[in-house]
Image (tube, rainbow, N blue to C red):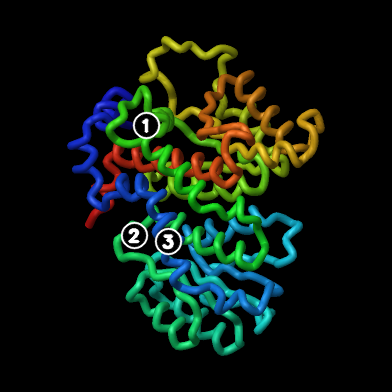
Amino acid sequence: MTSPELAEEVLDDLTLLRARDPRGLLPAVAGAGAQVRETARLTQEADLSRVTSAGRPRGLVVIGRREGAVAGQLLRALLGPASPVTVDVVPGPDLPVWMGPSDIAVIATRTGAGRYAVTPAYEAARRGVAVVGIGAGDAPLHAACASSRAPYVALPSTRVRHATLWSLLTPMLLLAAELGLVGAEVADTEQVAAALDEVATECGPARESFVNPAKTLALELLDALPVIAAEGPLAGAAAGRVADQLATLAGLPVAGFRLPDQRVALRTVLAGPLATSAGQDDFFRDRTDDAGRRLRLITVRDAHAAEHDGDEREPHSAGAATAEALRIAEAHNVPVSALAHSESGQHPRLARLARQLAVADFGAVYLALALDHERALQP
């Protein structure tokens, strides 16, 4: 296991960071705000009115895997149970049997290649389902959409794997806005881009570890077994993204719990056998004597869920479940990492979520680079 001292030296050495990042993950994550702005422009050029002019569909189905699936889950959570249109997320290549001319399929993939992207496009056209494609400009999916005159958001070939979430989510937000499913304030891509730019400044590689939230997170996770507490459905969808990034980029297994649904399981884990056995945690202990990894609670907060899911004093609310998890973590000496949490009045809801996801993305990349995991995976 890499020592915290050595990891901190790596994270504060710009030359070494570049050498350990052959795919350019750090610049890609730092450019998330620019991705949002560029993709918003590309979406306007694609002319979504070709599928929205007929009015609201019966159902909206997102066909995607990994980042495409996360984007669809975030959209579904944003719309919530009051949405007049059902939103489903499927991996493809098969479409749901019920889809027909009154539905819209969004095929979201960075590459726009492979049968999981192309087959649904042709099958949707055969059934008369309206399609919106998202993928690389020269991809087979682009040709499939062109054959049925479906709008296609052509992403630049410079998009980097594992750092394309906002390129896939932005067209979905704008589509939902044109369909009247979300208000203009929710689909304000400039606010999201500005929030991502703020995090890029706060978490950039030039900022040293002691003033860099993402580097701090990476150092905290070096010897940790992360457990994510997600406050409500939207935070739950975001937590899936955080867990996937930590596993895929840094090889770190993560357990996630959506609150309040899984509050019983979470409190049992935090008070269970993997928590610190002693009643008190000695800050000055020799950590080389520690056996294995220690639990660390990561919180993904959503002030909107806490405010609209009942009073925090109600035992079944998201806010109460989160507060309970924090109390149990403190009682059992489980350290806590909070991902850029801010109150509801400070940033719009999606911008608050964007900040948390951006810190987590940076943290996962920094952890991978500290462990030299990226070069180890290169052929």
Secondary structure type for disc 2 = loop
Q: Position of residue 45 (x, y in %)?
A: 44, 71
* Crowd band around label 3 with a 10 angstrom C-alpha radius: few (<14), some (14–19), many (20+): many
Q: Position of residue 92 (x, y in %)?
A: 53, 73
Residue located beneath label 1 in the image: 215
* Residue depth check, mark 3 versus mark 2: number of the one nearer the observer: 3
CA separation in Å, label 3 and label 2: 11 Å
Residue type marked 3:
Thr
Q: Is residue 179 left or right of residue 206?
A: right
Secondary structure type for disc 1 = helix
Residue in view at x 42 percent, y 21 percent: 290
Q: Is residue 122 left or right of residue 28?
A: right
CA separation in Å, label 1 and label 2: 23 Å
Image quarter hosting the N terminus: top left
Q: Quadrant of residue 299?
A: top right
First reached walking from the N terminus: tag 1 or tag 3:
3
Image quarter hosting the C terminus: bottom left
Residue type marked 1:
Lys
Secondary structure type for disc 3 = helix
Residue in view at x 51 percent, y 58 percent: 169
* Crowd band around label 2 with a 10 angstrom C-alpha radius: few (<14), some (14–19), many (20+): some
Residue in view at x 71 percent, y 67 percent: 85
Q: Nearer the viewer, residue 200 or 42?
A: 42
- Give residue 111's mark: none
First reached walking from the N terminus: tag 1 or tag 2:
2
Residue located beneath label 2 in the image: 159
First reached walking from the N terminus: tag 3 or tag 2:
3
Residue located beneath label 3 in the image: 39
* Residue closest to the far right: 314
